[in-house]
Amino acid sequence: GSAASTLSAYLFPFALAMLVSGTLGARWGRVRTVRLAYLLYVVSSLLCAVAPTLDLLLGARALQGIGNSFTTPLLLASLAAVTPRERLGRVLGTFGALQAAGQTSAPLVGGLAAEFDWRYAFVVLAVVAAILGLVGLPAATPPSTPGARRERLRDALTVPVLRVAVVALLGWGALGGLNFLVAFRAEDTFGLSSTQRGLLLTVFGIAGILVARRVGGLIDRIGPRRAIVGAAPVGAVLVALAGTMPSLVVVGLVWAAAGVASQFILVGVNAAVLGSSGANRGGAVSVVQSFRFSGAAFAPLALTPLYGVHPTLAFVI
């Protein structure tokens, strides 16, 4: 329970700050904002590594979340600014594949670090964030100078954007954000070690890496709405199977397939909001991502107690 709380401590500030991070980043300048965000992430990751108590660890995790909330929306807005609309799905698919690569490597790195000391995982994060801060945004990114255009949050908080945001919240809270639940079952039902659990969870991301670009191309052809509506019930079946199948091999295969379904939802919601013609698209995608990660933040709090009552119940819910 204490370990699960560190996930929520990160995700709640991350999601809350992301409501406004896209708009503020556009006002302050994308390049400068992203560099400062990575700097905050470096400092907070090192604080996590040396935290002597759980309370200080939770506080440092919250700072991590705030720092990272200013990266993803600005990266997505930069991609949309340099990409023709008819190719947006494919490009977002590539972005999704690299995000899946992060999801794939993170549990493995965390599992390997836990074999020695969990604090090493945060040192790795600090090093990676420092490199990203030095790289910054691509030179091709259109400059957004502070004060050049006053982006307004209310332009992002429209009914169509909020509708997509709710889909992102439910889709990620009930599918993409369930790695922790699969890890619980892998330990309790199959007796896997931390490294073995990390390896099991990587199949979700590997599947996403392999299919994300093709998923994006398909979304360019059929549209985000059809992609999301088709993937959601498939994802529901896969989550239920991951929580009930008695074979570890079958659970691994099912969870890999769930990684494919999650890419349809992830790329679909991003394409839906970035492909619109509304003002402040950077702020709009920031709102959608905020809701998405709110779903991931609520999932451990809502589902861990249910898992304690009965593991199958958590997956079915």
Image (tube, rainbow, N blue to C red):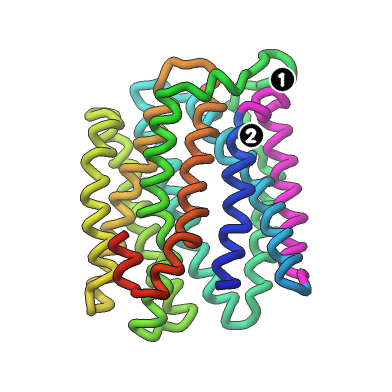
Residue 29 counted in the magenta span: yes
Residue 149, given in percent of the width and then of the height, sits at 67, 14
Nearer to us of marks 2 and 1 is 2
Residue 304: which numbered mark, if any? none
74 relative position to 235: left or right: right
Q: Which residue is drawn at 22% across and 29% down?
A: 222
Q: Is mark 2 on a helix, strand or loop?
A: helix
Q: Which of 294 and 38 is in front in this view?
A: 294
Q: Which residue is drawn at 54% across and 76% down?
A: 112
Circles 2 and 1, Cβ within 8 Å, touching? The answer is no
Return the residue at label 1.
145
Q: How far apart are marks 2 and 1 (CA)?
A: 16 Å
Q: Nearer the viewer, residue 173 or 263?
A: 173
Q: Which residue is drawn at 38% across and 71% down?
A: 200
Return the residue at label 2.
21
Residue 50, given in percent of the width and then of the height, sits at 77, 70
The amino acid type found where label 2 is placed reads Ser
Residue 296, given in percent of the width and then of the height, sits at 48, 53
Q: In the picture, which quadrant includes the C terminus? A: bottom left
Q: Which of marks 2 and 1 is nearer the N terminus?
A: 2
The crowd level at tag 2 (other Cα within 10 Å; few <14, some 14-19, many 20+) is: many
Q: Give the range drawn in magenta.
A: 23-51
Q: Main secondary structure of the magenta part?
A: helix
Residue 169, given in percent of the width and then of the height, sits at 43, 44
Residue 172 counted in the magenta span: no
Q: Which residue is drawn at 63% across and 35% down?
A: 137
Q: Is mark 1 on a helix, strand or loop?
A: loop
